[in-house]
Amino acid sequence: MSMNPYQLAQHKKRRVLLISAICCAAAISAILIGLNTGTIALSPLEVWRTLLGGGSPTEQMILFDYRLPRILVTVLAGIGLGIAGAVFQGATRNALADPGILGINNGAALGLIVFVSFFRTMEGPAALLIPIFTFMGGAVCAVIIFLFAYERHRGIIPIRLILVGIAVAAGFSALTLLLSLRLDPDTYAFAARWLAGSIWGRDWVHVWSLLPWIAVLVPLIYYRAKLLDLFALGDDISYSLGNPVNRERLLLLSMAVALSCASVSMTGGIGFIGLIAPHIAKRLVGPRHRYFLPIAAMIGLVVLVAADTIGRWIFRPNAIPAGVVVALIGGPYFLYLLFKSKAA
């Protein structure tokens, strides 16, 4: 029996609410498992008791000084990368767009290497400047990519965006390597861990450094969800509806660059989350951005928290960077999307 438009809309809303509830439960579970996982085991009961103000001094130190800041950094960065990937894909109409694939993360890496070359640390108040340096590096990279991928009468060409992004990313990687070779051994070791996507050693100053970027940019992007829907219809239709397409696209892409650069500044060179999260979200709740942006954010959160937890759990007491775990998942998924788009 077919449904009328009102029934279809209600069915859609119920599905979105159900998927949102499942994603929220998965996010909470991933966070709790991450808090329980480490060299020193804490049971779920001990974690809850410590979070509520109880627990021994040792348990409080483990949870509040080490695990909780690290988990919160991964939560915020996962949200940022998931949303940024959705904006890149929507604004450029390119299903393979991602901050890592386009080279934005490489620009952010260069910004961070410039930062540590001057300040030699990620600790203390100086850490508040890290997102600014990574944003400047990512912004320079993005401007170069979009200039070369843009044609006056055709706008941004999706396939050229990928090709130019790969070329520019290679150039920025070479500059990053050149500058990193000039660092002292300890700073170079830190830079190498960061480039691999290690989240080891994050504390509360890194949480406060990342939080304002996520808290401000994510609502601003969500407020423009309808514009992202219009981009999917083509620039001509958007123009006919009275929307300043080029200005809004530039604004959205700038916010996505800032969001992705701020996120990777605290988690390292982690790619593919911005590619995976929007695709899975679209499959779950459809292409409307007002529905799938929150789902993409939660999927990004779950993937990054789970990757960090798996990296700490499998080889404990030694840990592998979360970026390596994400790459093991994201690499095959990228190839799958590539072959799928070619077949289509």
Image (cartoon, grey):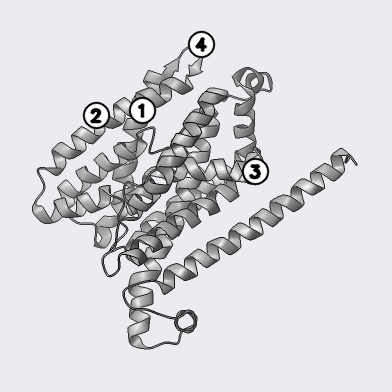
Residue under label 4, please give it. Answer: 153
Instruction: Indicate which disc, 4 or 1, sits on the residue closer to the N terminus.
Output: 4
Query: What amino acid type should be assigned to the residue bearing mark 4?
Result: His
Coordinates of residue 186 in the picture (x, y in percent)? 12, 56
Q: CA distance from mark 4 to mark 3?
A: 29 Å
Q: CA distance from mark 3 to mark 2?
A: 36 Å
Secondary structure of the residue carrying numbered label 2: helix
Q: Answer with left or right where residue 141 lies relative to residue 226.
A: left
Residue under label 2, please give it. Answer: 171
Work out whether residue 324 can be spotted: yes
Query: What amino acid type should be assigned to the residue bearing mark 1?
Result: Gly
Which quadrant of the view contains residue 234?
Answer: top right
Outermost top residue:
153
Q: Answer with left or right where residue 92 lies relative to residue 171.
A: right
Residue under label 1, please give it. Answer: 165
Residue found at x 28% / y 56%: 127
Query: What amino acid type should be assigned to the residue bearing mark 2?
Result: Gly
Which quadrant of the view contains residue 38?
Answer: bottom left
Marking on residue 202: none
Secondary structure of the residue carrying numbered label 1: helix
Instruction: Indicate which disc, 4 or 3, sits on the residue closer to the N terminus.
Output: 4
Residue under label 3, please give it. Answer: 290
Q: Mark 4 touching mark 2, by CB under 8 A?
A: no
Q: CA distance from mark 4 to mark 1?
A: 21 Å
Would you call the spot at circle 1 few (<14 residues within 10 Å), some (14-19), or many (20 or more)? many
Instruction: Indicate which disc, 4 or 2, sits on the residue closer to the N terminus.
Output: 4
Q: Mark 4 touching mark 1, by CB under 8 A?
A: no
Coordinates of residue 278 in the picture (x, y in percent)? 54, 42
Query: What amino acid type should be assigned to the residue bearing mark 3?
Result: Arg
Instruction: Indicate which disc, 3 or 2, sits on the residue closer to the N terminus.
Output: 2
Instruction: Indicate which disc, 1 or 3, sits on the residue closer to the N terminus.
Output: 1
Secondary structure of the residue carrying numbered label 4: loop
